[in-house]
Amino acid sequence: MIEEQLVNFETAKILKEKEIFIDCFYHYSEYGFLRENSVSNLIYVSTHKLYANNVDFELDRWGGGDKNSIAAPAQSLLQRWLREEHNIIISVVPFYNNTTGICTLDGYTFLIFEKESFEAITNDEDYKTYEEALEFGLKEALKLIKNHETDQM
């Protein structure tokens, strides 16, 4: 079964450090354990409060109601956020070896484009999967932006 690929724990920590919040259903504990937010009995509202059984609790922005939780958005959602909010495009392509001039279909790499500067950041690493290449591309793209205001997507 094909499932949405979530960002890994390291990328999620970068998001939290840069104060980037992307609303999502999954979060990591402070130790890197992935958990699903319990949406069956908790309703998240834009005021960042959690309502359960008519009791009002402050909700930590990073998910799960636990102040040490770290939001774990899908890679594709973070990729879209970077494109729409910062004009940074991440493209994953088959790996092309500049030394041999061979394009391999069993490996991938990423390219990052900044719309404003028209600059491209290339990568010489070969990753085994598309998702692995995208993950590294997301991390590199996050380095290009300053701490973000805590806007919600």
Image (tube, helix red, strand yellow):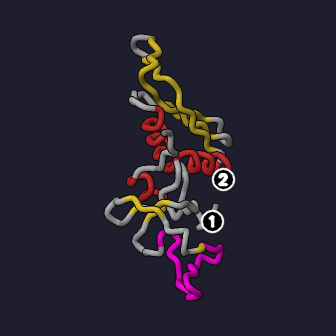
42 vs 95, left or right, is: right
Residue 83 is one of the magenta-drawn residues: no
Amino acid type of the residue tagged 1 in the rendering: Asp
> Residue 38's spot in the image, x, y percent?
50, 68
**Pointer 2 local density, CA inside 10 Å: few below 14, some 14–19, many at least 20:** few
**What's under tag 2, amino acid-wise?**
Glu
The residue lying furthest to the bottom in this view is: 55
Magenta stretch encompasses residue 62: yes
Crowd band around label 1 with a 10 angstrom C-alpha radius: few (<14), some (14–19), many (20+): few
Instruction: Give the residue pinned by disc 1.
Output: 151
Q: Residue at x 52, y 45 (%)?
A: 4
Mark 2 secondary-structure assignment: helix
Looking at the image, which is closer to me, 133 or 101? 133
Image: magenta residue range:
44-64
Q: Nearer the viewer, residue 109 or 44?
A: 44
Q: Position of residue 104 (x, y in %)?
A: 44, 17
Q: Quadrant of residue 126?
A: top left
Q: Nearer the viewer, residue 74 or 146?
A: 74
Q: Please state the horizontal and vertical placement of residue 31, each as a whole percent of the image.
A: 31, 63
Residue for point 42% across, 18% down: 97
Would residue 109 be found to the left or right of residue 54 on screen? Answer: left
Could you say which is closer to the camera, residue 99 or residue 10? 10
Residue 85 is tagged as 2
How many numbered badges does the structure rendering display? 2
Residue 35 in sight in this render: yes
Determine which of the numbered discs, if any, sits on residue 84 in the image: none
Is disc 1 placed on a helix, strand or loop? Answer: loop
Seen at 41% across and 50% down, the residue is 8
